[in-house]
Image (cartoon, coloured by chain):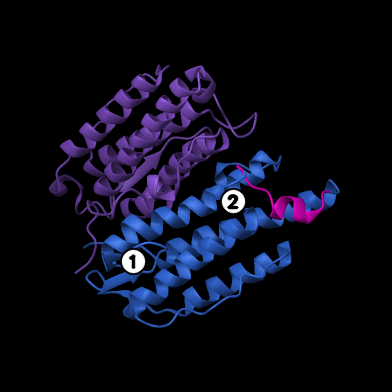
Chain colours: A blue, B purple
């Protein structure tokens, strides 16, 4: 008995990205109710050299679609990073979840020792599949979703930890 | 071949908490160099009704020591939440890591189906061990460490994603 690579990745991503979708719906409603120009929230950031809300969502999407594709040894869908509204971010999340849900456990399971190479600005990062998931993808994914949450909290959105965690 | 409950928990916690320790060392040095009263950073928060940096570290500690103890079916060490300096937060992190490192894989492995009950202000949350780890502990832990990071970034500390992820 142990956790499969599929169990530790795809359903975790889908659950948390669904929670982010619900948070962004609240953000869009908040902008409308308070007559806040949506771009103010979409472009908000916690420091001048941190990434905006929109980029946090895009990178979270890239992190998990890239993970699903690499573990399954298939090509990830390419998205153009042109989202400029809450509706477009919702569409980005929906197609990311749709891709993840198209992956079957048997494509992901057994990828613990798969060689994974991540291109970076400097040297490429090299991992085995399991270390890639546990030490790179999960921290990165939660980092960007949490930062999106924090940007919205910092800008007055009334959300709490249970919005982030979702219903058990 | 699959991921053991131990592999998906203790080393992941230890790695990320070690990264947080290094980030807090940079924060203490930054406070000293810029003549910032340490309490300003320790009490900093991203919204008036969000928790301070100190509380983020304490709750991250509680999350992972509680997880290690619950999965091993032993009592977690109790810490008093009295940390009031960077040095005391470092000591909290060190004793948390020491406790986690005292847990052996054979105490944690096989806890996938263990019944876990988490007291909350409302109804207690009930999980099986695997769902507790994947859907509650890991998101919560990364949430609080990321928020600690974001508080410090928002307050001008020069850190980047690699400080959060640590060396692969």
Q: Describe residue B5's horizontal placement relative to residue A158 as left or right.
A: left
Q: Secondary structure at mark 1?
A: loop
Dot 2 falls on which chain? A
Q: Does B148 lie within the magenta span? A: no
Residue A44 on the magenta span? yes
Q: Residue at x 15, y 48 (%)?
A: B105
Task: Report the disc number at residue B166.
Answer: none
Q: Which sits in the foreground, A44 or B10?
A: A44
Q: Secondary structure at mark 2?
A: helix
- For residue B104, above or below residue B33: below
Q: Pointer 1 indicates a residue of which chain? A: A
Furthest-bottom residue in view?
A74
In the displayed structure image, the side of residue B135 where residue A80 appears, left or right: right
Q: Residues within 10 Å of mark 1 (few under 14, many from 20)?
A: few
Instruction: Say if B100 sits above or below B164 in the image.
Output: above
Rendering coords of residue A71 (x, y %): 34, 74
Residue at the spot 35% in from the left edge and 66% down from the top edge: A7
Q: Which residues are magenta?
A: A36-47
Q: Which residue is mark 1?
A: A124
- Residue A64 rendering spot, x and y as whole percentages: 46, 66
Q: Nearer the viewer, residue B141 or A144?
A: A144
The numbered mark at residue A148 is 2
């Amino acid at each position: 008995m142990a956790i499969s690579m599929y169990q530790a990745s795809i359903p975790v991503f889908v659950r948390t990205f669904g929670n982010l979708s619900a948070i962004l719906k609240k953000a869009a409603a908040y902008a409308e109710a308070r007559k806040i120009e949506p771009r103010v929230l979409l472009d908000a950031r916690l420091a001048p050299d941190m990434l905006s809300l929109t980029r946090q969502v895009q990178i979270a999407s890239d992190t998990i679609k890239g993970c699903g594709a690499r573990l399954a040894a298939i090509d990830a869908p390419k998205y153009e990073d042109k989202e400029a509204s809450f509706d477009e971010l919702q569409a980005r999340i929906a197609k990311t979840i749709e891709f993840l849900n198209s992956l079957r456990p048997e494509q992901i399971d057994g990828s613990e020792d798969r060689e994974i190479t991540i291109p970076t600005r400097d040297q490429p990062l090299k991992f085995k599949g399991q270390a890639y998931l546990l030490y790179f993808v999960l921290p990165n994914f939660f980092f960007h979703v949490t930062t999106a949450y924090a940007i919205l909290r910092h800008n007055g959105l009334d959300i709490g930890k249970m919005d982030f965690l979702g219903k058990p």
